[in-house]
Amino acid sequence: MTAFHPQYIKDENGKKSFVVLSASDYQRLLDELEMMEDVQAYDAAKAKDDGTRIPASEVFAGIEAERKNAKV
């Protein structure tokens, strides 16, 4: 786990209400969250694996087609 250096803003009762992170800490947090989401998506896909495979060339062709449609 990456060490973050948060600062806290407290309300009038002394309760921590907000967290302030440096831009670099915030970016690292987002990067770690994205990595965790990728792992969860991989685990979910593996759990649903029925043995069916799609050739990579078909997958890449589909991605390129979606990109071209998105630009229109």
Image (cartoon, rainbow, N blue to C red):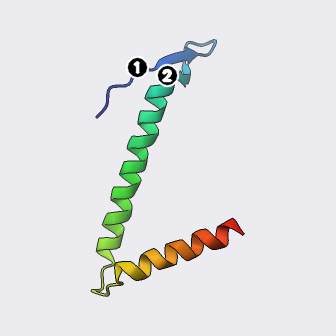
Left or right? Give the position of 70 relative to 64: right
Residue kind at label 1, given as amino acid type: His
As displayed, is residue 1 above or below residue 10?
below
Residue with the mark numbered 2: 22
Horizontal and vertical percent position of residue 39: 33, 57
Residue at x 32%, y 26% (from the top left corner): 3
Left or right, 53 with reference to 23:
left
Three-letter code for the amino acid on which mark 2 is drawn: Ser
Residue drawn 37% across the image and 49% down it: 35
Asked whether, in this view, residue 60 is left or right of residue 55, the answer is right
State the image coordinates of residue 37 (x, y, percent, origin top left). Answer: 41, 54
Mark 2 surroundings: few (<14), some (14-19) or many (≥20) residues within 10 A: few
Question: Above or below — where is 9 with respect to 61?
Answer: above
Q: Position of residue 17 (x, y in %)?
A: 57, 23
Q: Earlier in the sequence, mark 2 or mark 1?
A: 1
The spot of residue 45 in percent (x, y) is 35, 72
- Quarter of the image with the C terminus in it: bottom right
Give the SS element for disc 2: loop
Depth-wise, is mark 2 or mark 1 nearer the camera? 2
Residue where numbered disc 1 is placed: 5
Q: Quadrant of residue 58?
A: bottom left
Which residue corresponds to the image point at 33% horizontal and 65% vertical from the top-left?
A: 42
